[in-house]
Image (spheres, rainbow, N blue to C red):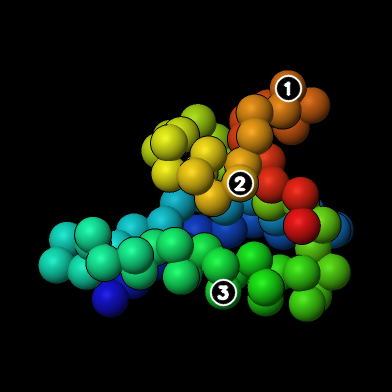
Amino acid sequence: MVDSIGKIWEKDRIHLEWVAIKNKYQKIALSKRLMSDFFKRMKHINISHITVGFYAQEFFFNNGFKIEKQYGGMVKEL
């Protein structure tokens, strides 16, 4: 279902490079559930911030990310 998730770790912060879901699994809220699970897992291992670039801005805004100049992209505080 999920092609892959790219991530880079830095202490208590992680940068999410990309998320890819096969076309036939899109539009069924799978990405929302995937992100929710990812947030829970990251919080469990003491990650406090998740950063992403500016791709798919609407998707990340809808998942609680905000633009933060300090991080050079979008960030979600857990």
x and y percent of residue 67 in the render? 64, 28
Q: Is the C-beta separation of discs 1 and 2 under 8 Å?
A: no
Residue drawn at (52%, 64%) of the image: 35
Question: Relative to 35, does residue 68 appear above or below in the rendering?
Answer: above
Amino acid type indicated by mark 3: Asp
Instruction: State the residue position of label 3.
Output: 37
Q: At numbered mark 2, what does the secondary structure look like: helix, strand or loop?
A: loop
Q: Report the residue at 67% width, 73% height from top.
A: 40
Residue 7 located left or right of residue 20: right
**Left or right, 60 with reference to 12:** left
> Is label 1 or label 2 in front?
2
What residue is disc 1 on?
69
Res 8 label: none
Specify the amino acid type for callout 2.
Answer: Gly
Residue in the image at 76% along x and 69% along y? 43
The amino acid beneath tag 1 is Lys
Q: Which mark is residue 64?
A: 2
What separation in Å lies between label 2 and label 3 (alpha carbons)? Answer: 14 Å
Is residue 15 rendered to the left or right of residue 30?
right
Residue 65 placement (x, y as % from top left): 62, 42
- Mark 3 vs 1, N-terminal side: 3
Dot 1: element: helix
**Spatial separation of the CA atoms under disc 3 and disc 1:** 26 Å
Element under label 3? helix
